[in-house]
Amino acid sequence: MFNNYTAVFILLFGSLFINAQEVAILKYDGGGDWYSNPTALPNLVQFCNQNIGTTLSTDIKTVEAQSIDIFQFPFIHMTGHGNVVFNSEQISNLRNYLLSGGFIHIDDNYGMKPYLEKELVKLFPDNELKELPANHPIFNSYKNFPKGLPKIHEHDGNRPQAMGIFIENRLVLLFTFESDLGDGWESPEVHNDPPEIRLKALEMGANIIKYVFTH
């Protein structure tokens, strides 16, 4: 039977052939600064195109959680510091997107975690965040990080964690916490990070991109 779920599935995979390598930033409600780190994703895209053979567009689009446009993008990035709220329509749309083959990377820019966690429970109530082990292939798809997620900014001084939601053994959502990869992707003058720190952040970002586009 051709139902809404089937239509969404076909739409997503049809769009993957049209926009085979495109990424976007997720705009969300709640007052959090979804627009933070404006140079981060363009810099990561440029790094990936130069180092792992992608042909990603440097014209980064913004998509809203309730929009059908999210199905045009196999990779969506989300970041911010503050509150995150998804209504029922947005939750349904995001769930369909992820179940249909999409992927979301959420990078906590500091202070996002307590707001995000309650929304993820609504998104997948039966699939909690699980920490990825250091030997997960996302940590070595391009450059090897034998200890797992690298520490880019100190914040509270806690260890960095990469946590994911798996659906039928497929990683559909990655949440990076106490690392702040996005700050490391920003242009050098924004945070004045040492070159070796920025390189670690970009290499880990390339790991994520390569993992998503090859799994």
Image (spheres, grey):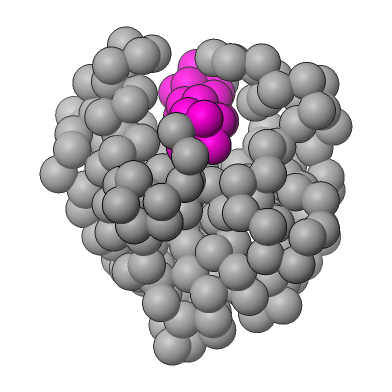
Residue 141 in the image: state x and y as whole percent: 59, 15
Residue interval drawn in magenta = 196-214
- State the residue in front, 108 or 115: 108
Q: In the rendered view, does 102 fall on the left or right side of 150? A: left
Instruction: Say which residue appears at 83% left-offset and 45% top-offset.
Output: 131
Instruction: Say which residue appears at 26% left-offset and 42% top-offset.
Output: 42
Does the segment drawn in magenta span residue 112? Answer: no
Residue 73 in the image: state x and y as whole percent: 32, 42
- State the residue in front, 139 or 181: 181
Instruction: Say which residue appears at 48% left-offset and 69% top-offset.
Output: 80
Q: In the rendered view, does 52 fall on the left or right side of 155? A: left
Residue 28 in the image: state x and y as whole percent: 41, 74
Tell me, yes or no, if residue 100 can be seen here: no
Residue 193 in the image: state x and y as whole percent: 47, 46
Q: Is residue 9 above or below residue 207?
A: below
Instruction: Say which residue appears at 80% left-offset and 28% top-offset.
Output: 147
